Amino acid sequence: MDFFTPVVDDPYDYGAIAAANSLSDVYAMNGRPLFALNICCFPKNLPAELWNRVLRGGADKAIEAGIPIVGGHTVDDPEPKYGLVVTGLVNSSNYWTNEGARPDDALILTKPIGTGLITTLLKNSTIDLEQAQEAIISMRMLNRTAAQVLSQFEVHACTDITGNGLLGHASEIAEASRVGMEFSLGAIPMFQTARQFADSGKFPGGTFANQRYFGHHIDTDRNCVRIC
């Protein structure tokens, strides 16, 4: 189960992004989703048409994934939240976890990073929708194709990068696998808008929480990040 508050203003995009994010947990284990349930926490005082568009975004993303949404649950909540409960299957002899990384492994990112910064900038009206569009398209994109490609290779560890960010999730892999990691900053794919505004200081609250929680594992300099 995964759900969150709106990260964009457009209800349809919000529903599609939340659904893609929920499905990502199954793909990150080399799994195949079977069906989903809606999780809807919606304020009653806003128009029903708005929530119809959220649900349509989620439904269209489920159709793209080839699965039905077979039901769900709705509660009245002053702060909107939407996501899915996804049921899937994995092959017991070929599924991925975050604890199998080995020394000399290469780290592969299937999407650029920086969505948290971009959505925060958008909420603060620092950037416009056009500047955020590249990140919105990426957030709506299913990780299905990436999982299908990776399944052709020997994958030792895998995770989806969401609330804990690249360094947070990498720290979890490193700790679970009992290895260290080293990143070349110039080799990390990042959305151009995020790179442009990285020094603005307008980061999502989770970034600072992650820094406090994972910071003791991380050493940085101008060109490199090391996770111990």
Image (tube, rainbow, N blue to C red):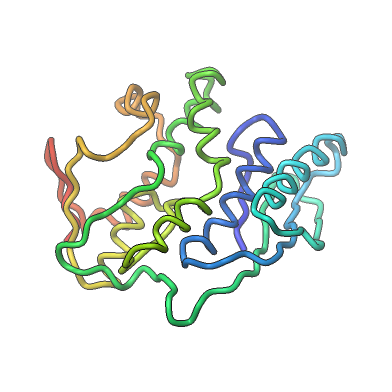
The foreground one among 211 and 187 is 187
Residue shown at the point (26%, 54%) measured from the top left: 107
Q: Quadrant of residue 94?
A: bottom left
Residue shown at the point (65%, 30%) measured from the top left: 9
Residue 59 locus on image (x, y percent): 75, 48
Say if 97 sits above or below 225 in the image. Answer: below
Q: Quadrant of residue 172?
A: bottom left
Left or right of residue 186: residue 211: right
Residue 159 locus on image (x, y percent): 41, 60
The foreground one among 111 and 114 is 111
Name the image quarter holding the C terminus: bottom left
Residue shown at the point (67%, 67%) measured from the top left: 34
The foreground one among 12 and 147 is 147
Residue 1 locus on image (x, y percent): 62, 63
Say if 155 sits above or below 161 in the image. Answer: below
The foreground one among 26 and 53 is 26
Left or right of residue 84: residue 43: right
